[in-house]
Image: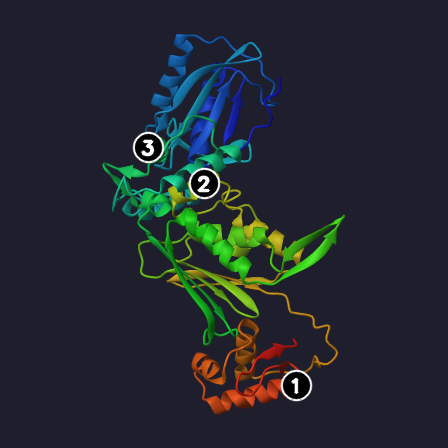
Amino acid sequence: MNFGKETETLEFKKSTGEMKEAMISVAAILNKHGIGTLYFGIKPNGDVCGQDVSESSLRDVSRAVYESIRPQIYPAIEEVILDGKHLIKLEFNGNLTPYSAAGRYYLRTADEDRLVTPEELKSFFVANEYREKWEKAPSPASIRQVDQGTVKAFWQKAVSAGRLPEGRYSCPVILKRFGLVSGDKLNHAGEYLFGSTHPVTLNAAIFATDEKLTFLDMKRFEDNICNLLGLAEEYILKNIRWRSEIIGAERTEIPEIPVAVIREVLANGFAHASYNGHTYHEICIHPGMITIYSPGKYASDHQPEEYMKGNHESVIRNATIAKILYLNKSIEQFGSGFKRIHSLCKDAGIRFTYESDDLGFKFILYRPKIQSDSPSVPLDVTLNATETAVLAILKQKPDSSRNEIADKISKTVRTVQRALDSLRDKGYIQRIGSKQEPRWEVLK
C-alpha cells in the first residue's frame, strides 16, 4: 500500500530509529503551519513498511517530543494498522512559534526541513511581539458567544480539503485545539475568527468614477472573519461584469476578474491585517479598478515583487488566523500569496498594483476596458467627470430624476441637465420616457 506523497504538513519516517529527524520535522512543520501529522512505519516515497509497536515505543515517541520540542507541546500519539502493518501516528499542533528541536530552529519547505536563518528567526519574534499582545489576549466575548455554524463549516471544509484529519469535532474541541480560548473567554483570535459579536467591520462601496467622490452603493458589514470572507467575495462578484462563453456544449459565465484572484487577495488581506488599530477593511469598486484595503502596516522586509519572483518566507502577523484560513483552504500556501496572485493575473491578462503606508495596505486590481460593439458611439469621445458620474448612475437606475442625480453627485440640477444633453448628443443615452417622467436607455 502507498500512502501518497509527503507535504508541508505530512511527514513519513521508516521507523522510530529516525527519532531525531522526526523531531526536526515536527519543529519545522510547527514553525510553518502550526499543525501536522507524522507517521513512523512509512517510507519517504509513501510505501507502508510498518514497524514494531509496543507500549514502550509509544512512550519513546512521547518522551522524545517532551525532551526535544520547545516550547512544550502535547501531541496525540496512537497505533494504527494499515494493510495488516502497524504504524505510529503522531498528530501535533501549537501556536507559540518559533519551536526548536534540541535547541535548533527549522522551517518546512515543501517536504524538506531546513535551518532557520538569523533573519527569519528575528522575524518570528517580531511577529510574536504583536501576536502575544493581541491574538492570545482575552477578548470581551465569552465562550458562549461563538458562531457554532461557522465553526462547524470550518472543520467540515478543512477535513474535506485534507488539511485537518478526520475525526469527531465540536466547537469546544476546535476552540481548544487551536488555542482560541483564554479561561472562560474567547481570545481575540477566537472572537475575530468565529465570534457572534460582529467583531470586524468591512465597508464596501461602488463609485461612479475612479475617484472616491460619487458613490452608487454603500454597504457596511459587521461579522467575524470567516463570514466576512464570503460576504466580501459575494459583493465583488455581484457588482462586476460577467461574460458568457460556450465551452463544449454548455454556456459558462466568466467574471472579468477571476474568482481565484479575488479570493486570494481577500483572504491574505484578512490574514495579515492589524486588528488593534482604528481603521476598517474596505472594498471600493470603481469603473476602472477594484481596491481592497486591509488595516495595518506592511509587515515584511521583503517587497511584494520579491515574493513574486523568489521563495521568501512569509512574515505572519496573525499566526492563528492565518492557520485557520490555511486549513479551510482560503489561503493556498503560506508565503505564496503574491506569487499566486501574480500568476493568476498574468494568465487572465489582469493588471494590478499596490499601495502601502503606516496605516494599511491597498491592493488594486484594474478592470478590463469595455469594448463597444455599437457603431453609433464614436470610440474617441471622452467624457468629463460630471458626465461620467451621471452615466454611471443611469446604468444603475435608468429612471433617476435630475434632482436625484444632482443630490448624488453634489451638483446643481442645471449642471445635471447639461450633462444629460451632452450624453444624449454623444450617443451614450436616449430618452424613452416623457419629460415629466423621464427614463433613460443607456446605449453604451
The disc, 3 or 1, on the residue closer to the chain's N-terminal end is: 3
Label 2's element? loop
Where is residue 225 drawn, in percent x and y? Answer: 40, 49
Q: Please determine whether, in this image, residue 112 is positioned above or below residue 376.
A: above
The residues tagged by marks 3 and 1 sit, at their Cα atoms, a distance apart of 64 Å
Q: Please determine whether, in this image, residue 111 is positioned above or below residue 118.
A: above
Q: Which residue is mark 2?
A: 117
Residue 136 in sight here: yes
The disc, 2 or 1, on the residue closer to the chain's N-terminal end is: 2
Q: Check the picture and name the quadrant holding the N terminus.
A: top right
User: At 42% from the left edge and 37% from the top edge, which residue is drawn?
Assistant: 152
Amino acid type, residue under disc 2 in the picture = Thr
Where is residue 210 drawn, in percent x and y? Answer: 52, 73
- Residue 426 is tagged as 1
Amino acid type, residue under disc 1 in the picture = Lys
Where is residue 275 drawn, in percent x and y? Answer: 34, 53
Q: Nearer the viewer, mark 2 or mark 3?
A: 3
Label 3's element? helix
The residues tagged by marks 2 and 1 sit, at their Cα atoms, a distance apart of 63 Å
**Which quadrant of the structure image shows residue 176?**
top left
User: At 65% from the left edge and 88% from the top edge, which residue is drawn?
Assistant: 425
- Residue 200 is tagged as none
Q: Check the picture and name the quadrant holding the C terminus.
A: bottom right
The disc, 2 or 3, on the residue closer to the chain's N-terminal end is: 2
Q: Please determine whether, in this image, residue 356 is positioned above or below residue 194.
A: below
Q: Nearer the viewer, residue 166 or 64?
A: 166
The residues tagged by marks 2 and 3 sit, at their Cα atoms, a distance apart of 37 Å
Q: Which residue is mark 3?
A: 172
User: At 38% from the left edge and 22% from the top edge, which residue is drawn?
Assistant: 65
